[in-house]
Image (spheres, helix red, strand yellow):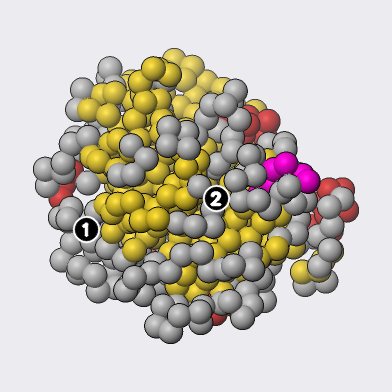
Amino acid sequence: MDTIKDINLTDDNSSRKESRNGYYRETYRPQFHYSPGYNWMNDPNGMVYYEGEYHLFYQHTPHDTRPDFGRMHWGHAVSKDLVHWDELSPAIPPGEDGAIFSGSAVVDKNNTSGFFNEEGSGLVAIYTNEGNRAQPGKSQVQSIAYSKDKGRTWTKYEGNPVLFPTETLDFRDPKVFWHDESSMWIMILAVRDRVEFYSSPNLKEWSFASEFGSDIPGIHRGIFECPDVFRVQVDEDPNTMKWILMLSVGDRNGVNPNDPEPPAGGSGMMYFIGNFDGKAFTLEEMLESIDSIKWVDYGSDFYAAVTWSGVPNEDGRKIWVGWMNNWRYATMLPSEEWRGQTSIPREIKLRTYPEGLHLIQAPISELSQLRKPILSLQDLTIKSGMNVLSDISAAKAEIIAEFEIGTAVEFGFKVRKSSNQETIIGYNISSGELFVDRTKSSATDFHSDFTAKHKAPMKPEHGRVQLSIYVDWSSIEVFGNQGKAIISDMIFPDLESKGLELYAIGGELRVVSLQINDMVSIWGNETV
């Protein structure tokens, strides 16, 4: 197995964890979010479940803390539970065929590709080659590779590339899945201001099927990236299913500068609800205005999320993970040894509300194994000036709370607090907004746009507001009202900033329930 910075990342879990304990304590290092041991990562890609393992591939520059797009690799980590991760050597390196950009991986269980005659099945990766020279002027093409040993080694297909663009230079990030009804592999591909669908019987030969998005006004502020399309139950009813199409939108770079930015600026994600018939995706209802765009996350730092393929039917969940960063300042983060992390894995659902269907995201249940209870309260009235959490400190925590609206005009939590630092997670009753204020959170001078307050519309439900908050050494993820409103933001406070406050402004607030848990480090750093 290759080495990374002289740290041998073998397949022996105990030796890996022992070697990591020394360097997963660095300033800002996330303790229950995945980050590579060293250097740069961006988009997660190739997520697939196979023979008891969840594979997480990602855009990785193993030799630098900044992205080297000309030599981009697929980084690689595996997990049995989506919580504890073992980093392996980079899976697919660049070569004469160009850099290895984002893509997907599938289980070819029926050997449609013909790569697995003796094995019967295996993994096939579908990715964008950037800088390919097979056809002049068409630098982004789609290629495939296959693995017969559970993703540990990969062989690039000798017939690559398998798909060329017709004209555009932006032709990338394939997400592939098997469509039962048509008995075909389906590829959705980002093509500048639209996505294109292709179909194939064998993952090698692809035919154009349709395109989506070029004629929808108001969504073209940046180049589309990392699309995904999948089917989800509505209200957890297996007899009612809808398709969701996800699009990541890069920071503005000239496609249409007049279209609106994502809620927190920079790069962001939007979603569409509709139907897919094996050839075309159609909207359930057309967008009435720019204001009706559905955003996945209202924070700055959730991008390029795509779902795991191959999750067993008996599990039934649709699970994804995103890159916690924003292209507006991604290369400037103050971490030194590493730069880039993922969100916690989230389960995706669709729920019916009076205003219509809405995407719901929930932290996966497997995170409960990390809980180390700190405090539990019920039926408590909070008044202005009180702080019932003054004796509690936490550099990382899970906070689950339910509030009943009272006379207070604003309430919430102040986390990672010290004399000069704090991040506020609050709710403004008059405006009906959940917010994260990181203006005093941390080292923020690396980019002017990092100092910000991010807001998400969220009405109380039956007079109550529910919050699930995940605080790590360099991130905040807030799930409001069971995951209807999400704000994901990075922060970079001093490790000594561990104070915690529950506050109310302008009146009283009833705490229906409050549970605070420490989150045990997935890297074995139990003393901090």
Residue 122 is inside the magenta segment: yes
Work out which quarter of the rendered image holds the N terminus and state it: bottom right
- Residue toward you, 448 or 146: 146
- Residue toward you, 330 or 86: 86
**Residue 444's x, y, as percent?**
44, 66
Which marked residue is nearer to the observer: mark 2 or mark 1?
A: 2
Amino acid type, residue under disc 1 in the picture:
Ser
Above/below status of 343 relative to 136: above
Determine the residue positioned at 36% across, 47% down: 246
Give the residues drawn in magenta, as a range.
Answer: 118-123
**Residue 205's x, y, as percent?**
49, 57
Rendered image: mark on residue 214: 1
Q: Is residue 235 visible?
A: yes
Amino acid type, residue under disc 2 in the picture:
Asn
Q: Residues within 10 Å of mark 1 (few under 14, many from 20)?
A: few
Q: Is residue 37 visible?
A: no
